[in-house]
Amino acid sequence: MSTATVRVGVGRMVRRLGGHGWLFRVCLGVLVVFVAVALLAPWLAPQDPTVGDFADTMAGPSAQHWLGTDQGGHDTFSALLEGARTSLLGPLGVVAFSSVGGIAVGLFSGWRGGRVDAVISRVLDVLFAFPSLLLAILAVALFGKGLGAPVLAMAVAYLPYTARLVRGLTAQEKTRPYIAAYLVQGHAPAYVAVRGLLPNIAATVLAQSTVNFGYALLDLAALSFLGLGVQPPTPDWGAMINRAQSAVLAGQPLSAVVPVMAVVVAVLAFNVVGERLGERGTR
Amino acid sequence: MNASLLEVDGLTVELPGTARPVLDAVTLRVAAGEVVGLVGESGSGKSVTARAALGLLPPGARRAGRVLVGGEDVLGAGQGRLRALRAAEVSMVFQDPRAGINPVRRIGDFLTEPLRLTRRWNRRRAEERAVELLAAVGLPEPERQLRRYPHQLSGGMLQRVMIAGALAGEPRLLLCDEPTTALDVSTQAEILALLGRLQRERGLGLLLITHDVELAAATCDRVYVMYAGRIVERATAAELFGRPRHPYTIGLLGSTPPLTGPPARLRPVPGTPIGLDEAAPGCAFAVRCAFAQAGRCDQEVPALLPLVDGADGAGHAAACVRLAEIPSPAEEVRP
């Protein structure tokens, strides 16, 4: 029965996703391509982007380097493909941590209500006041550069968005009669909250997480641009933009423009998909 | 011994920010095998009374009085005891099955989850029981229904599912909160017949909450009439039909088309029920009552007094200070 459930669920989801218009479908396609590229990057990349050829720096597009090279002679196309891995893995970590934490906090707060809810809401308000980037920079200062510290810091900074959304939805959904019906059946409140209520608000929460993904990608790219995130030679879109500064000044902006385009397209696609999923959820 | 399954004794419930109590000294009893009606307009406190029996009062409610289910105090019960009570003793059928059943889970989940989680039954056993229950409430092809989602069923079918779910724990007391209000007229009769059959077969105590006084009189053994959080009249169905005593009951009967007999001109009860933000120093019905006497009805809160001497708290009673002076509509109106 469980396999049948899964099959029906996936089929229904695909049919549902098809019914959002061409923009949604294009953006979803873009996201699928990005994820595929990230997964297959080592096999797709024509050259090793960590190895620079100093005899061939800041070159324009050619048969050998499709998108040219940067000031260190690294192949921009290969770096773009490999960079998709770290550039998408970071936001994925942020979204995963912030969603799990946010759902837990929001569900608990909204379900309990009263004083517990008031205290948690004020704590979330305080967290809201911290700019995510500042928190991430603070974490880097404390724990060192790399992907781990900023991702964790940003997960904490993004948690309130999901938590507040889940809290509001929970408080609203909790008054619906089916919740009372569950309680009347003798179920434990924790069970009713997680198995009964959560599936009903999951679509909206998923939409928020998708939008969060776009913002996290942008923030992490900014952090890498500042040189605080992923360290060279690991390819990363933000770091690529940072290193391409001298190339831009030298009149060869291609190695900067390419990762910028990748960031913009990815964030845009995530926002469109997330927004449409949200409309679906609230309808 | 005629032990009460549900005993509500002087239950008063006050919510913060309201001028009058939601429930004011409500006393009612439901014995095993008895169908009891609770009749009143929207906001009269019918549903709150039923919810109190399940320990489902809104948070922040101040309460006084006692609610006993099977002799056990509900208001003072802890979370664990309350859960056990809900799982085994008392169950509820909600008004709108569309809202009362989780739309994203299957019918089978709705029916088997309580058995699997509160009774630790395995899936097979719980599903067999669910099929039995669906057959008992008259759903065709019960095995297939288990795999379906609520939106694939009609309102009437879904209400049957809700009733099946309420019976899953073999409760002795069933609370029905306007079980037919959200349904088509043709389906209403079927659901009521089903409830009546199940009640007789299983010897359930049944509390039927409705705003339809004719319906209550036709299906119930005894009826309580509520107005603005107070019980204003208590009677057997025959007494209520034959000799309604409280002006509000008389008004309700006069404003409802009779189920049988020639249609008479309907006389609506003038005015609107008082809200929770209005306090009435005397009788809450006084402002709408044709018999109200200034200086008396608007000053004095009438007590629910038995009309028959020696009544043990179940006989005909009404809460009106002018009871002796009010003519009950003559018996010739209703056979």
Image: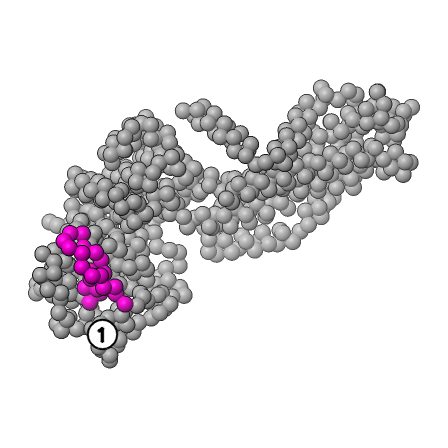
In the rendered image, residue B24, in percent from the top left (x then y), is placed at: 28, 64
The amino acid at mark 1 is Ala
Question: Which residue is located at x 21 percent, y 56 percent?
Answer: B257
Question: Which residue is located at x 26 percent, y 59 percent?
Answer: B40
Main SS of the magenta part reads: loop
Task: Pick the residue in front: B198 or B306.
Answer: B198
Residue B225 sits in quarter: bottom left
Span highlighted in magenta in the image: B247-270
Question: Which residue is located at x 22 percent, y 74 percent?
Answer: B292
Residue A48 sits in quarter: top right
In the rendered image, residue B293, in percent from the top left (x then y), is placed at: 22, 77
- The answer to if B268 sits in the magenta stretch is yes
- Whether residue A110 appears in this view of the structure is yes
Within 10 Å of disc 1 (Cα), the crowding (few <14, some 14-19, many 20+) is: some
Given the image, what chain letter belongs to the residue carrying mark 1?
A: B
Task: Pick the residue in front: B5 or B214.
Answer: B214
Question: In the rendered view of the protein, which quadrant contains the N terminus of chain A?
Answer: top left
